[in-house]
């Protein structure tokens, strides 16, 4: 037990996500889809990818633009090379995170650097507040060894990608959206071990179980999120209480909503249609990056 939580959030709904492909034909599961953007503000998208079939990922994501938000790529297994128009280049591999703030715009590619084996991970899109949508692009590769970790009683191991957990600051913190991004591993044999995380009730939150199933211990009931599902959590109580069996792994994501209009056209996310038209015009005029 880390931070005392007396009223755990209950499960609001389960989401299976949609099988789709993106980039040059990478197979993935879009877990946070367009219709959930308002509900899960400030998060715009979550893709889960995972395959040991090279044909599912080998084509990668050749050059494409982004403007107005941040992309957070968490690689569970595999190697992906990133290059962008700001001159940044990096190799994202096993357990590492790449945090990219597109701001006013850049063009980048995300290409597999492996021809066989498993590629597994997540890409999350986090919105930027209106006054920061045209900020300078920013980028950081965080190798696995630099991601803060916490070991809690009962055999619970937490990787703190963003926000705070058990008094430990994550690799990234952000004002306004205050993202929490945890990778929680249940490694012990104690079936009663629970993971608690305090959370303001107005922050939107969800979990995604990627190994084994996860129990959401709400104030009045306990409900299960099966593997490969997202559990969207109600805005209530003072935090969340999770229980898994040995081997369960889940990501936990929460943030403070921006409550601003969301206008999206593909890889551009702004507040108004006019700003989207400007984004397309600027991109076509070659004003992204460099
Ligand atoms: Mn991209």
Image: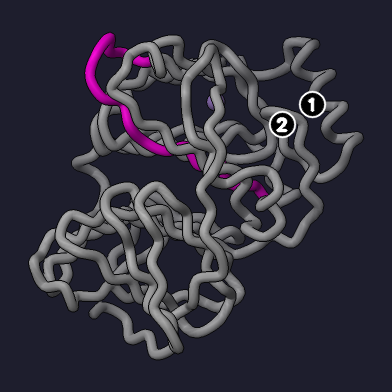
Q: Where does the image place residue 160, in percent across and percent down from the top left?
A: 31, 56
Q: Residue at x 41, y 53 (%)?
A: 208
Q: Secondary structure at mark 1?
A: helix
Q: Residue at x 25, y 38 (%)?
A: 95
Q: Residues within 10 Å of mark 2 (few under 14, many from 20)?
A: many
The answer to whether residue 166 is visible is no
Magenta stretch, residue numbers: 112-128
Label 1 close to label 2 by CB (< 8 Å): yes
Q: Where does the image place residue 134, in percent across and percent down from the top left?
A: 71, 37
Q: Nearer the viewer, residue 13 or 289?
A: 13
Q: What is the CA distance from the residue labelled 1 to the residue labelled 2?
A: 7 Å
| Quadrant where ligand 1 appears | top right
Is the residue 126 above or below the residue 118 in the image? Answer: below
Q: Where does the image place residue 257, in percent across and percent down from the top left?
A: 65, 62
Count of residue discs = 2
Q: Is residue 124 magenta?
A: yes
The answer to whether residue 223 is visible is yes
Q: Where does the image place residue 209, in percent across and percent down from the top left?
A: 36, 53
Q: Secondary structure at mark 2?
A: strand
Is the residue 76 above or below the residue 24 in the image? Answer: below
Q: Residue 268 shows which numbered tag?
A: 2
Q: Is residue 30 left or right of residue 247?
A: right
The residue that mark 1 highlights is: 279
| Quadrant of the rendering where the C terminus is positioned | top right
Q: Nearer the viewer, residue 231 or 100?
A: 231
| Quadrant of the rendering where the N terminus is positioned | bottom left
> Residue 68 lies in what quarter of the image?
top right
Q: Nearer the viewer, residue 46 or 170?
A: 46
1 or 2: mark nearer the eye: 2
């Amino acid at each position: 037990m880390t931070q005392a939580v007396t009223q755990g959030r209950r499960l609001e709904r389960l989401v299976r996500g949609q099988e789709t492909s993106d980039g040059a034909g990478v197979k993935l599961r879009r877990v946070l889809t367009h219709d959930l953007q308002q509900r899960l503000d400030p998060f715009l998208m979550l893709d889960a990818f995972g395959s040991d079939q090279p044909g599912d990922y080998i084509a990668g994501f050749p050059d494409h633009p982004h403007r107005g938000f941040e992309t957070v790529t968490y690689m569970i297994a595999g190697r992906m090379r990133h290059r962008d128009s700001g001159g940044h280049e990096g190799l994202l591999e096993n357990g590492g995170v790449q945090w990219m703030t597109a701001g006013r715009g850049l063009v980048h590619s995300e290409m597999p650097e492996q021809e066989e084996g498993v590629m597994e991970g997540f890409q999350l899109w986090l919105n930027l507040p209106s006054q920061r949508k045209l900020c300078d692009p920013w980028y950081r590769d965080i190798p696995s060894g630099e991601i803060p970790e916490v070991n809690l009683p009962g055999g619970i191991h937490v990787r703190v990608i963003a926000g705070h957990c058990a008094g430990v600051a994550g690799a990234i913190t952000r004002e306004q959206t205050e993202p929490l991004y945890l990778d929680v591993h249940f490694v012990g044999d104690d079936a009663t071990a629970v993971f608690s995380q305090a959370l303001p009730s107005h922050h939107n939150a969800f979990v995604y179980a990627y190994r084994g199933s996860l129990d959401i211990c709400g104030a009045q009931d306990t409900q299960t999120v099966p593997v490969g599902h997202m559990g969207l959590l109600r805005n209530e109580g003072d935090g969340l209480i999770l229980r898994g069996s040995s081997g369960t792994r889940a990501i936990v994501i929460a943030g403070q909503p921006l409550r601003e209009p969301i206008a999206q056209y593909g890889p551009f996310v702004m507040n108004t249609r006019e700003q989207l038209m400007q984004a397309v015009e600027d991109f076509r005029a070659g004003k992204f990056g460099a």
